[in-house]
Image (tube, helix red, strand yellow):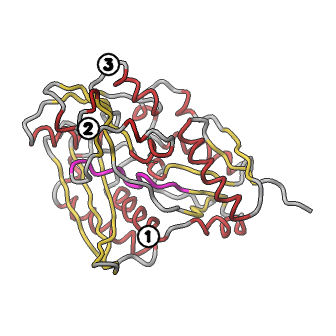
Amino acid sequence: MTERALRLGTRRSKLAMAQSGQVAEAVQQLTGRTVELVEITTYGDTSREHLAQIGGTGVFVAALREALARDEVDFAVHSLKDLPTAQPDELTLAAVPVREDPRDIMVARDGMTFPELPNGARVGTGSPRRMAQLNAYARSHGMTIETVPIRGNIDTRIGYVHKGELDAVVLAAAGLSRVGKLDEVTDFLSVDTVLPAPGQGALAIECAAHNASLAAALAELDDPYTRAAVTAERSLLAALEAGCSAPVGALADLLADGQIVKEMRLRGVVGTTDGSTLVQLSTTGPVPETETQAMALGRELAAEMLAKGAAGLMGERAL
Ligand SMILES: NCc1[nH]cc(CCC(=O)O)c1CC(=O)O
């Protein structure tokens, strides 16, 4: 008797289909079972409102989670940065695969890099985190730029530049990589200039908590270092009590001495969207071996950032 196909719930966007397709392939290899994609339309895909107004990127995740809860699908793939920091008891984060390039990138007209943009350049991004850091860089380098709130899928955003409506847009490298459009990039933004969103570039593979055998199979795709890094980043975000649309950047990476991994470093930033104030700190600690240790690293940095006034910078819910 053959087992029935595994149902992978996915959004319909090009990016979601690309990342779900890649995971489907890996799960099929791993389990020998057919994986079928089940398309689910989310409110975030149909609404024209700005994301921050409809409750942030959590809207993309909610419909997939409801399909899991109703047993309409067996597992789902999310962009980890879109996951709310609280993990529901009835769902298991079965795997966090190896992370892609976590950086943000710029697509600008005429192949320009960020520092090459002319004064008054209009830069599209709907993310308060990107706005805060782009504006802070501009201020400290004597540039004037205007950040313009935009949303939409990858093609729509890049389209603003191709159609001449904006001078540049900022997107995640990972998204472009997954849909095969890295050749559009005109500048890879250093994480010293723009620290990415917590979890950026990583995927989350989720299934129902009661489905222990599937969770165990999916766990083969887990990368413990990526999981530790994103756990620390999300713990920072949670401890700052910031939502997914707050101007918070975080990135954990490994510090190595030659081939030997020594420590994990966690960097964090929070700022006002106009870039006039940024609180930017980092901490290092032993490479976390448990979820508890990874979370402690995030909480430790959050406490230091709060002591430096981070809370006062997060009141804004503005775009
Ligand atoms: N905010 C939407 C979103 N969620 C995940 C990605 C792709 C990158 C990733 O998986 O981290 C994007 C697009 C972007 O920020 O450019």
Q: Residue at x 39, y 71 (%)?
A: 294
Report if residue 196 lies within the magenta region.
yes
Distance between the alpha carbons at the discs numbered 3 and 2 = 20 Å
- Segment colored magenta: 193-204
Give how far across and how far down residue 89 sits, in percent. Answer: 59, 61
Q: Which residue is mark 2?
A: 131
Distance between the alpha carbons at the discs numbered 2 and 1 = 29 Å
Q: Is residue 128 above or below residue 224?
A: above
Q: Give the left or right position of residue 6, taking residue 146 as reference.
A: right
Q: Which residue is mark 1?
A: 225
Q: Is residue 50 above or below residue 224?
A: above
Along the line of sight, the residue nearer the viewer: 44 or 264: 264
Task: Please identify, in this view, whether the residue under mark 2 or under mark 1 is nearer the observer.
Answer: 1
Q: Amino acid at mark 3?
A: Gly
Name the main secondary structure of what is drawn in magenta: loop
Task: Please identify, in this view, whether the residue under mark 3 or under mark 2 is nearer the observer.
Answer: 3
Q: Earlier in the sequence, mark 3 or mark 2?
A: 2
Q: Earlier in the sequence, mark 2 or mark 1?
A: 2
Q: Amino acid at mark 1?
A: Tyr
Q: Amino acid at mark 2?
A: Met
Tell me which image quadrant ligand 1 sits in: top left
Task: Please identify, in this view, whether the residue under mark 3 or under mark 1 is nearer the observer.
Answer: 3
Give how far across and how far down residue 58 sits, in percent. Answer: 49, 43
Q: Which residue is mark 3?
A: 164
Give how far across and how far down residue 155 sits, in percent. Answer: 46, 29
Q: Is residue 189 above or below residue 124?
A: below
Distance between the alpha carbons at the discs numbered 3 and 1 = 41 Å
Q: Is residue 283 above or below residue 191?
A: below
Quadrant holding the N terminus: bottom right
Q: Earlier in the sequence, mark 3 or mark 1?
A: 3
Give how far across and how far down residue 167 sits, in percent. Answer: 27, 25
Kindly identify which numbered label has been placed on residue 169: none
